[in-house]
Amino acid sequence: MMFAAAAAGLIIPMLMVLARALAGPTLYDRVLAGNSFGTKTVLLIAVLGFIGGRPDFLDIALLYALMNFVGTIAILKFFRYRNLGIADRGDGGSEGAA
């Protein structure tokens, strides 16, 4: 019963964070709200797995947490450098030439 209340209690902050993501004035507000939504989703998956007696949901929650982290870093890198690849050094691509 307590975990069902915890699951229901996670829905309200998720809705608040979703509203912040839609109304955020800057990109960083939206990225932070998206990351926070992902973290709360991980918690919700873990709690629902515990309620349903499915311990394999913890593996899914951990995978989702890793994807959330990597996605946040990728989005921030893209908006800072405007690409996700190796930065162009301007030397024509000759890394080992003497």
Image: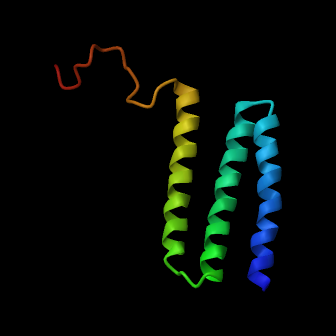
Count numbered badges in the picture. 0
Taking the image as shown, residue 86 lies to the left or right of residue 36, namely left
Residue 40, compared with residue 19, is above or below; it is below
**Left or right: where 73 falls relative to 95:** right
Q: Nearer the viewer, residue 76 or 34?
A: 34
Name the spot of residue 81 as percent of width and height, x first. 52, 26
What is the image's colouring?
rainbow
In the image, 25: left or right of 56? Answer: right
How far from the left and from the top, in percent, is residue 97? Answer: 17, 20
Residue at 59% x, 77% y is 49
Q: Is residue 80 above or below residue 90?
A: below
At 22% across and 19% down in the image, what residue appears? 94
Q: Is residue 22 left or right of residue 45?
A: right
Between residue 88 and residue 15, name the one nearer to us. Answer: 15
* Residue 96 image point, x, y percent: 18, 26
Query: Residue placed at 23% from the left, 25% from the top?
Result: 95
Q: Quadrant of residue 98?
A: top left
Q: Point out the image quarter for the N terminus.
A: bottom right
* Residue 26 percent location from the top left of the image: 76, 30
Q: Is residue 71 above or below residue 76?
A: below
Q: Splitting the image into 4 quarters, where does residue 10 fall? A: bottom right
Toward the front, the furthest residue is: 52
The residue lying at 81 percent from left, 30 percent from top is 25
